[in-house]
Image: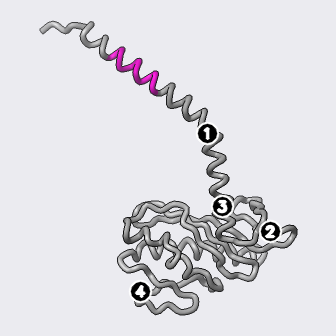
Amino acid sequence: MKVDVKKILKPAAVLCAICIVIAALLSVTNWMTQDKIKQINEETTAASRALVLPGAKQFVDSKNGTYAVGKNGNDVLGYVFTTKTKSYGGDLKVMTGIDKNGKVTGVVLLTINDTPGLGLNAQDESFRNQYLQEAPEKGFKLVKNGNAGKGQINAMTGATITSKAVTECVNEAVAQYQKIKEGK
């Protein structure tokens, strides 16, 4: 059996050329949009910070970048923490605001890929607003019976994994706040 080299090399060369052109176009597109993407990310972060710590006019990132201090002039109003963990559908990223007195002032889910109609209900205000209370020193406890009291959060029916993940993120923010409060 005789192999015709032209029949093999010509399509391979065309395919290689197409790949090079597409890779170059993707690279140029990435280069052209990187500043806009960075700007949008900064605007989203600023809007989320303002949402979780109302009243703060400016935010100063900590030296180690683990939190931001919310200020109004020279007055410190509180702190904003971004934490993440694994949830049912993958990574979960949560932004939590805690005022200078230790009260959770806001919780926003930045990244969530859980099941629509179940885990995605964690984005609902009715679930997130449960955290708007004095932060317990040892963190919030999750309850499944619907009778949450002070320092407790009602788990979402059918989405216990997501409820645990959000609570874990908020509790991590509370732990970081405690370290700041203790001067560590």
Relative to residue 101, is residue 173 depicted above or below?
above
Element type at mark 3: helix
Task: Please give left or right for residue 109 compared with residue 68 in the image.
Answer: left
Relative to residue 4, is residue 180 depicted above or below?
below
- Numbered range of the magenta stretch: 12-22
Q: Crowdedness of circle 1 by 10 Å Cα count: few (<14), some, many (20+)?
A: few
Tag 1 residue: 34
Mark linked to residue 47: 3
Foreground disc of the pair 2, 3: 3
Q: Residue type at mark 2?
A: Lys
Mark linked to residue 71: 2
Q: Residue type at mark 4?
A: Lys
Task: Please give left or right for residue 67 compared with residue 139 in the image.
Answer: right
Which is more N-terminal, label 2 or label 1? 1
Tag 4 residue: 144
Measured Cα–Cα span from mark 4 to mark 1: 44 Å
Number of on-image labels:
4
